[in-house]
Image: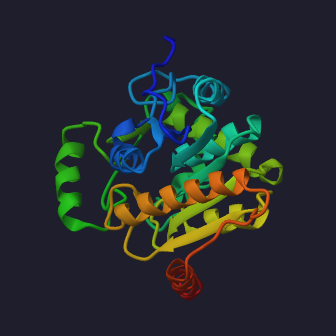
Amino acid sequence: MKAPVFPTLQANGHAVLLLHGLSSSPLELRFLARILADEGFATHAPELPGYSAGSGHVPMEHWISAAVAQWDALAAQYRHVSVCGLSMGATLAAAVALRRPAARALLLLSVTLDYDGWSIPWYRFLLDYAYYTPMRSVYRYREHEPYGLRNEALRSKIARAMQKGEISEVGPASIAMPALHEASRLARSVRGMLKRIEADCLIIHAIDDETSSPHNARFVEANIGASFLRTIWLDDSYHMVTADNEREVVARECALFLRESAEASASSNNPTPVVSRALARRLRQLATLARKA
């Protein structure tokens, strides 16, 4: 793998490693990357061998090694390096934070420790067993509506791309069984080690997530070892929060959290990040919506 090339060092010296979803591409994170760049953060959204679309299949340990190598390359150039992931990419991001405690912040968007959303077929649990049969070389999980999107106009556009079997801004048209099997292994591994993660952590999850239910976010919230932890619930999005109706909210909240995390680490007199009254009020409103869900 070639050594990655990164943008020129930004003024605040804070880079963010962005990890896309399973068997997908950095297109999923394009909007988020642009907003973070506008806010002064350097961003890097790599393709990972055996994890990204069209790169074959390798054990999940190789996914982690490749992501950690990207983090290390960023850390050689920037004062702060945070890691952000979407869907299974969030689970992979947590694995990176486990192995690199120096990570400034961990941003988990639609974190997926279990495919248990309302649109997941009832037979999903059987796939882990089917992997050990000849089916593993022929079965592919086909994406279907709503494609992680509450926005109907964008959903129609994505549906056309999916019908052509293309990689879109919300992921691939299908996922092979070996990738799903390794994703399950990754999730089990991370689930058991969350308490060891001490990096500042932001969790953003849709209360109507059709792929990974709110139980995933609540589990992380209850078990992660972070002392600075914020959870934000969205009420107008599905799984693909970086592309759906509240994508700008997601991007702005990520930028705010990254800034607060870095400022808190630099200030011995004020170790607790300050949250504006307006933001605190909105967080309480979202938390109330989540409890009613």
**Residue 22 higher or lower than 226, as above or below:** above
**Residue 67 higher or lower than 143, as above or below:** above
Rendering coords of residue 179 (x, y %): 53, 34
Identity of the residue drawn at 50% across and 26% down: 48
Identify the image quadrant of residue 108.
bottom right
Given the current orientation, which residue lies at the most extreme top position? 2
Rendering coords of residue 34 (x, y %): 34, 46
**Is 267 left or right of 24, judged from the image as shown?**
right
Identify the image quadrant of residue 114.
bottom right
Given the current orientation, which residue lies at the most extreme front position? 269
**Residue 54 higher or lower than 168, as above or below:** above
**Is 47 left or right of 34, judged from the image as shown?**
right
**Residue 56 higher or lower than 127, as above or below:** above
Identity of the residue drawn at 21% across and 59% down: 154
Residue 111 seen anywhere in this rendered image of the structure: no
Residue 133 seen anywhere in this rendered image of the structure: yes
Rendering coords of residue 191 (x, y %): 74, 51
Rendering coords of residue 124 (x, y %): 54, 53
Identity of the residue drawn at 65% across and 24% down: 65
Judging depth in this view, the residue of 110 and 119 nearest the camera is: 110
**Is 168 left or right of 20, judged from the image as shown?**
left
Q: How many marks?
A: 0
